[in-house]
Amino acid sequence: MTERDTARVLAHPGPDEIRLEGVLHALSDPVRLSIVRDLAATEAELACSDFDLPVTKSTTTHHFRVLRESGVVRQTYRGTAKMNGLRREDLQSRFPGLLDSILTAATAEGGRPGATA
């Protein structure tokens, strides 16, 4: 691994370091919940640019950082793209049924950012 590669490695909590309050905080924001819903809908990793979010680029960066630091997503670099994957297995192991319950409730409410009831 080159010095440039190590500079591009992002810190993530280990599975045992994921905390319930951090996950709930991360998922309490409608924009972050939208990101997680999109990731849950696919097995593939998605680039940050794949998301159509109603916020500025700097705010988007903040939302992805909160999700990563809470242990909800794993981010890796592929070239210049930052790829995002849902840490479904880690979350299921740590908090059985939590993610699915939140996603089910969000779908029932139609919880998209900017969505009107």
Image (tube, helix red, strand yellow):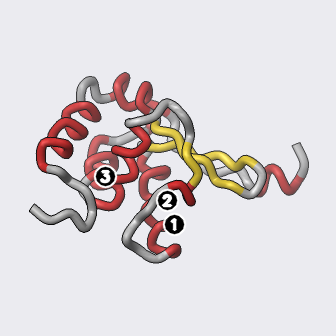
Give the residue at mark 1.
Answer: 61
Q: Looking at the image, which is closer to me, 106 or 28? A: 106
Question: In terms of secondary structure, where does tag 1 sit?
Answer: helix
Give the Cα separation between the discs numbered 1 and 3: 14 Å
Judge from the rendering whether residue 89 lies leftward or rightward of residue 23; answer left or right. Answer: right
Say if mark 3 contacts mark 2, CB within 8 Å.
Answer: no
Say if mark 1 contacts mark 2, CB within 8 Å.
Answer: yes
Residue 65 is labelled as 2
Give the Cα separation between the discs numbered 3 and 2: 13 Å
Q: Amino acid at mark 1?
A: Thr
Residue drawn at x 65%, y 46% as measured from the top left: 76
Q: Amino acid at mark 3?
A: Leu
> Counting other residues with Cα less than 10 Å from the Cα at mark 2, is it few (<14), some (14-19), or many (20 or more)?
some
Residue drawn at x 28%, y 34% as measured from the top left: 99
Give the residue at mark 3.
Answer: 33
Say if mark 1 contacts mark 3, CB within 8 Å.
Answer: no
Give the Cα separation between the discs numbered 1 and 2: 6 Å
Instruction: From this view, report whether residue 27 is shown above or below residue 14.
Output: below
